[in-house]
Image (cartoon, rainbow, N blue to C red):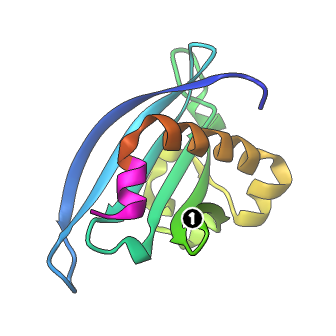
């Protein structure tokens, strides 16, 4: 993606409690800008007491901002996990995630479509920017 991305972290809210441990499940979000123009959004879901479950992340690209066509929105589903060698992120099949029900995110891409279209590369650029500039992602991946 050769262009500099910036983010604007948004709100974080509790969604309820884990049936297993009783700890809160949470979601946080933010906006993504490319060269100062609206480019997309990210949404992350996690349960604080279960870092082994990872963080489910949706990155919605295109169709955001004033005058943009919302029908152009495409969403890549990612999963962040802590591994033996450190944190990692991978593209998952969006249709098999809860993100598929979130119509505001746009067309949910399969893993194959995200990789073939180049959207996965764009989503990784967004997730890297979020990792570096929204400390909530590192907290969620590492757990408290």
Viewer can see residue 104: no
Image position, residue 134 (x, y; %): 41, 38
From the image, tell me which residue sits under label 1.
86
For the residue pair 141 and 10, the one nearer the viewer reads as 141
Q: Does the magenta segment cover residue 139?
A: yes
Going 77% across and 32% down the picture, which residue do you hit? 1
Going 60% across and 64% down the picture, which residue do you hit? 94
Q: Quadrant of residue 73?
A: top right
In which quadrant will I find the C terminus? bottom left
Circle 1 residues within 10 Å: few <14, some 14–19, many ≥20:
few
Q: Quadrant of residue 9?
A: top left
The range drawn in magenta is 137-144
Viewer can see residue 7: yes
Q: Residue furthest front?
A: 85
For the residue pair 133 and 114, the one nearer the viewer reads as 133
Give the secondary structure at mark 1. strand
For the residue pair 113 and 25, the one nearer the viewer reads as 25
Image position, residue 97 (x, y; %): 51, 69
Q: Does the magenta segment cover residue 12?
A: no
Q: Residue furthest left?
A: 22
Helix, strand or loop for the magenta stretch, by majority = helix
């Amino acid at each position: 993606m050769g262009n500099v991305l910036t983010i604007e972290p948004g709100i974080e809210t509790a969604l309820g409690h884990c049936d297993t441990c009783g700890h809160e499940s949470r979601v946080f979000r933010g906006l993504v800008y490319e060269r100062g123009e609206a480019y997309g959004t990210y949404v992350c879901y996690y349960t604080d007491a279960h870092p082994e479950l990872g963080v489910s992340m949706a990155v919605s690209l295109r169709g955001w901002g004033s005058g943009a066509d919302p029908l152009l929105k495409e969403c890549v589903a990612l999963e962040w996990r802590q591994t033996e060698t450190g944190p990692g992120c991978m593209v998952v099949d969006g249709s098999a995630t809860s993100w598929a029900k979130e119509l505001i995110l746009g067309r949910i891409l399969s893993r194959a479509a995200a990789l073939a279209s180049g959207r996965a590369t764009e989503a990784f650029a967004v997730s890297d920017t979020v990792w570096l500039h929204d400390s909530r992602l590192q907290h969620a991946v590492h757990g408290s």
